Image (cartoon, rainbow, N blue to C red):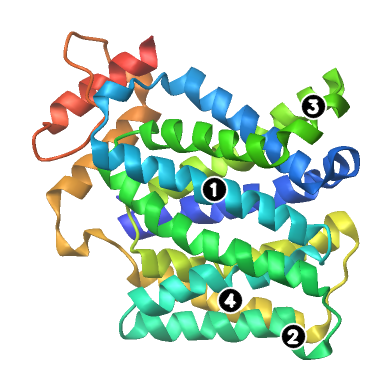
Amino acid sequence: MTRSPARTGASMAVAAMLCVQLGLAASVGLIDDLGTSGAAWLRLVWAGILLLAIVRPRVRDYSREALVAGTALGVVTAGVTILFMGAVARLPLGTASALEFLGPLTVAVVRSRGTGRAWALLAAAGVVCLTQPWTGDADPVGVALALGAAVCWAAYILLTQRVGDAVSGLGGLAISMPVAALVATFVAGPGVVDHLTPQLLLYGLGLAILLPVVPFALELMALRRLTTGAFGTLMALEPAFALAIGFLALSQVPNGLAVAGIAFVVAAGIGAERSGSRHEGGDPRLEERAAVDVVATGSDELEAGGGDHHPVAGPGVLAEDRVDHVGVRLQQ
């Protein structure tokens, strides 16, 4: 039985969220050695290097629109990473994630209609239960950093979908991640280099795979299958994951109201998964792009052939050409 695009996209989004929260929990030791901005910088630099090595993009093969969108995505990626790492250093992981979720929530409310908006509002109620802003215990600087990350995350969702639609495979990330690394280097790099050791470099490489390389790739593919509204609602699960991982890995114990908040956001996530497919309208170009991702996961069945390099998706590029491109690229 073939899985629906919405369910596949939702599974990718959930896997991405788990990677993000595990990566953040594992970054605590790196923060102790390099500081919040230094830890973010090291992860982004390694991610940029890895994606350049894997994808090997050629600028002339991208449209101007794809380059502009990819560059903008890189800037907001650096912003959300650095700002959120600063928030995590001052707030419990679950609280920081809940505040950051206000960005995806705004996208979900604005972009959703009918039952989709109802799921977004249920998710908002769950986040309030998780955050419990009336307690007044949150660090104000941490709150400001988390809200800044929320703005960047909202822009990240919209730009990721645009880049995913304009560029096939992981070509979009091969633009955005090196840009994010450059922005992070400008912000934090000079004060970190002197503190690096071989052990920290290796640690940073492992963390970069867990966060951001794997989750950002999964989110890009998920947004090819889900509406931005449904994706934003699904992101309500992230504070719940953060609370669970904070409890298991960092001994941050939630209260009963926070547990009720988890139930709300899980219900909202299930509702979003059932109603959030982008393919219900039957756009064949979107299905062709999804097929490219399937081919990429089964590259051992492809044979490299002639064909031109076509990283840019569009009406002028046949689906067969994009499949040939992925097969050649994966076997190089």
In the structure shown, which secondary structural element does the residue marked by tag 4 occupy? helix
Q: Is residue 22 left or right of residue 270?
A: right
Q: Position of residue 120 (x, y in %)?
A: 47, 80
Mark 4 / mark 3, whichever is N-terminal? 3
Residue lying at 29% horizontally and 14% vertically, measured from the top left: 328
Could you tell me how far apart the alpha carbons at marks 2 and 4 are, in whole angstroms? 17 Å
Within 10 angstroms of label 2, few (less than 14), some, or many (20 or more) residues?
few
Please give the residue where the numbered disc 4 appears in the rendered image: 265
Q: Please name the residue that numbered disc 3 is placed on.
A: 193
Q: Quadrant of residue 191?
A: top right
- Marks 2 and 4, the one that precedes in the sequence: 2
Mark 3 closeness class: few <14, some 14–19, many ≥20 residues within 10 Å: few
Please state if 118 lies on the left or on the right of 177 as rendered: left
Q: Nearer the viewer, mark 2 or mark 1?
A: 1
Indicate which disc, 2 or 1, sits on the residue closer to the N terminus.
1
- Percent position of residue 187, x then y: 67, 42
Determine whether the residue tagged by mark 2 lies in a helix, strand or loop. helix
For the C terminus, the image quarter is: top left
On residue 133, which mark appears? Answer: 2
Kindly identify which residue carries mark 1. Answer: 77
Residue 95 seen in this snapshot: no
Separation of residues labelled 3 and 1 (CA atoms): 21 Å
